[in-house]
Amino acid sequence: MKRLLPLMAGMALVLSACGREDLSALNPQGPVARQQLELMKISIGIMSLVVLVVFTICIYVLIRYRRRKGDNSIPKQVEGNHKLEIIWTVIPIILLIILGVPTISTVFGLSKDYSNDPNALKVKVTAHQYWWEFEYPDLGITTAQELVVPTGKKIQFELTTADVKHSFWIPSIGGKMDNNDGLTNKMYLEFDKEGVYRGKCAELCGPSHSLMDFKAKAVDQASFDRWVAAIKAPVEMPKDEAVKAAFQNKCLTCHAIGETSTGSSAPNLTGIGSRLTVGGILFNDEAPVVDNLIKWITDPQKVKPGNMMPKAQDLELTDAELKGIAEYLANNKLEY
Amino acid sequence: MKGDAALAAHAHTVKRYRGLMDWLTTVDHKKIGILYLIAGGLFFLIGGLEAILIRIQLIKPMNNFVSADTFNELITMHGTTMIFLAAMPLLFALMNAVIPLQIGARDVAFPFLNALGFWTFFFGGLLLNISWFTGHVPDAGWTSYVPLASPTYSEGAGVDYYVLGLQIAGIGTLLGGINFMATIINMRAPGMSFMRMPMFTWTIFITSALIVFAFPVLTVGLVALMFDRLFFANFFETAAGGSGVLWEHIFWVFGHPEVYILILPAFGIISEVVSTFSRKRLFGYSSMVFATVLIAFLGFMVWAHHMFTTGLGPVANALFSIATMLIAVPTGIKIFNWLFTLWGGSIRFTAASLFGIGFIPTFVMGGVTGVMLASAPADYQYHDTYFVVAHFHYVIVGGLMFGIFAGMFYWWPKMFGRLLNETLGKITFFTFFIGFHLTFFVQHFLGLLGMPRRVWTYLDGQGLNGMNLISTIGAILMGIATIVMLINIAVTSLKRPNAANDPWEDGRTLEWSIPSPPPEYNFKQIPLVRGYDAWWKEKMEGKKAMTPAEPPGPIHMPSPSILPFFMSVGLFISGFGFIYDKLFLAIGGLAVTLICMLLRSVFDDHGFHIEEHEQEKGVTA
Amino acid sequence: MSTHQHAEGQLPHEPEKATLEGRNKILGFWLFLGAETALFGTLFSAFLALRHNIGDGPSPQHLFELPMVFAATMILLTSSLMSVFAVQAMHRHKVKEMVGWLIATIVLGLAFLGLEIYEFNTYVSEGHKMTTSAFSSSFYTLVGFHGAHVAFGVLWIGLLILQIFKKGLTVVTAPKIYVSAIYWHFIDVVWVFIFTVVYLMGKVG
């Protein structure tokens, strides 16, 4: 029948598209996402049963009891049937209990707070229009846009925002939690395998809400320790005096880099040369880092409408300064 | 009627209007129903156009068909317009057209307020949509969360249009809720006890109660946001001790009952349509009534399932999960009752019954994703993704809109004296049905594959392209179906109005016992109701008409009035004054409204009489 | 649509319920009060959520002067009693007496409003304004909405008194008097809650 066709198409899609390892909730890469998928499977299993029963009765009834040509009889008027009514009240209640019990236990399990656990890593996430700030308070590190974490450890997130409501979501690792103004939300995740996972903002926050992607990079503990050391290493200023002056006077008023941090209202630039993207969405494997940086600094509004960073010409950056800063930042890499 | 006072009541001149003035001053529920249908239909087209533009923008990755700002305006206006200015008014159209007829009454309890309700809705909706022309369009989503909607982050007047437009339109809805509750309680024909009321009347009764208790909550939220934006108050300003989460609570305490306000009338329509077109009484009537009451009651207890990721804590999340799952039980009861009404019946497929029957599997699909969403930890993945968008469109479009289409086809002859064209109706049904499933089924997967909602665009290479394309194609099909419906309406309006009293021949309820369309006074004599499915009962005993419950005589009617129109214009002007900070407009507009209220109180409406000899005129058998 | 009782020109015992329109008006108004309950309920909820966030402004303990607020409460409660007497007089068809009690109702209502305006003025001069904090915003909105309802009620009952003079007590004017009395009692009940939740709880902290 007509309605089965899209259903079949959908089923085919299900089988073929469990989705990307780095993006899909149906392809979990961590224990939290796996627990959530288990609940999804229980609920869809139960609900498929319901849909099957309803569809079967519906199709049967429409074929069996359709009015034949010339038939003007009045069917028997039935008020109800107590037995049936009890059955279709009790069975749904039982089905809901089957779903309800694991729901409650998972709700409490996932709300566990690992803040005081010495084996957990604490990360404070502050969302901005339209970028993500990650601070590791126990390690004295602040970075942006790329969340580097060790595998096999509980990562205890503390979520807040610097402006409007956002929502922190790494679909293949676990569900999301909102970043509320003036409040801190706690959530933990855990990464099984090394890899790069895509993060999304999941609360309407302005024009560039859809472009507020971030990356979560899970590495082994040794790599992570090397990353921590690398990010804390002192960073040299640009060699060229003109570029250095421009960088300090026009960029470091909002941004910070290495130990010479000044501004904190814009993403931290330490190691930006080795990140996967510039601005969260300009991929460094599709164009050279330096080109992406030039594209971004020239007109950030064009890449991410509505964001706070002024255009190069509004900062009165000359072409030479712009190129120099871009090259300097492109070469600012972290080895780990 | 005897005595000098009675003569005096007849002695005044009868005010009757023609043409445009007739429509501007009418207090007749049948005409008001048509006004709601036209206005709601127009806003539906606007909301539909906004949907098509959204889907065109999303047809391919990194598209630039509209700008990011415009996109956020489109999604905000699409949601707000469809829910408040299209779906609800179309339901009000059917409520107005049908309820007084189904209970054997001559009009609603408060005809003047009925007209006022229409005009405030219309002018509120007009105010909201004029924003497109002023360039200050609301863009913080139909849920208007703060801080995004606060004066700091939404500096322009856009959100002010939202706040004022909805407050004005909301007055109309609230008045309608009060009106229909009072009508159903006080004005049923003799013999029509509560448990003999048609199912549609029951659902409207319960819906009206929901409106009365839910809409004022939204009003407070809108007033608080308005005060923050216009008078620098601090309800939602965190720096001064306000709370953004408070907005979420207030909004959803309204918002959840709102979706039951939307769906319960559709449930009522399905009950009528399924019953009539299978020639069988509704299976399990008393449990249907009980289930409706339970759904309404539980509907007030589940609002925080929209806030599972807000951070309320595991206890709250667990409680609201369980409460939300519970609503599935009475809803399931209804589905099975409809299926077993069809079972053993003699099913006739018309455009009306196709939409009614198509509702059942479609709404069930939407309902089961609702149960999936109810499980909070799973919802941490689904929330704010296309999975939720799929769910609510399944229940609102696949549920409510199918119900409205069914109701329109079913009651069109009663409202207009003409049957809509069946062939065009069937084309509409199949095109819309296929288009609908194409659009929204794939969206479940889009959400699970990592696509958040309210996204202006998406990156290439994420595996989302194909399904977004399918979704857009489906939307275009729904657009075509709507155009076919418009053609149907146009073609039908050219036909002669010669529909029978009971054009489907199997009508069970009182509206089918009187002419199509009914005379101005509905019933020449109020009927005596002797059981459930009052008209069917009489027909099965061989009667050709209802037994009257009163002798024939002059019928007293309420007078038309231009005051509801002017009161709404006053509110409209006042709204502009508040949006653009023009005090004299704000106060002046309110003054117009208050003066009209004064006039209404001071000058009593004596109404007029339709004499017996006038009652014979123009009555078609 | 309506049936007039004109037996010997006498008004029935409960003139407000003698016609269908009258009964509809009374039922409709109770339903409206249901909506108003939801409205004030939400205002109270917002106030309860925000009442401790006083920001830089003065605290409720500092601001509120219970003797004055208690006096206002007594005035409003008495005005409600006056309106009870008015309806009783209406049932006994004593029109002049009814009007007297209605005048007393609105005079006391005006006194309540006068005290409230004085009270708000004092607060503003002490740095407690709408814009001061979340507490102050929710305070003024809740208490202010109530005051607006009292003001509307005073105007409405005043207007009804004039209508009684012009049209007399009939089956058409009686429901209006009855409904305005129910309204007046409602805003009195709301005030009792305000007194408790805002002022008493504010003093106690």
Image (spheres, coloured by chain):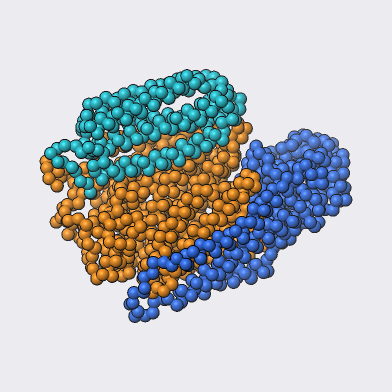
Quadrant where the C terminus of chain B is found in the figure: bottom left
Q: Where is B261 relative to B441, above or below?
A: above
Tell me if residue B189 can be seen: yes
Q: Quadrant of residue B272?
A: bottom left
State whether residue B351 is above or below residue C50: below
Q: From the rendered image, report the letter of the chain displayed in orange.
A: B
Q: Colour of chain A?
A: blue
Q: Residue at x 58, y 27 (%)?
A: C205
At 39% from the left edge and 54% from the top edge, which residue is drawn? Answer: B204
Q: Confirm whether residue A331 shows in the render.
A: no
* Image quadrant in which you'd find residue B620: bottom left
Asked whether A319 or A268 is in front, the reply is A268
Q: Position of residue C95 (x, y in %)?
A: 22, 29
Q: Nearer the viewer, residue A192 or A85?
A: A85
Percent of width and height locating residue C170: 21, 36
Q: Is residue B409 left or right of residue C18?
A: right
Q: Which chain is cyan?
A: C
State the residue at coordinates (36%, 73%): A76
Residue C188: % across, % down: 40, 30
On the picture, is A2 further left or further right than B601? right
Seen at 26% across and 70% down, the residue is: B541
Q: Is residue B563 left or right of residue A273?
A: left
Nearest the camera: A125 or C78? C78
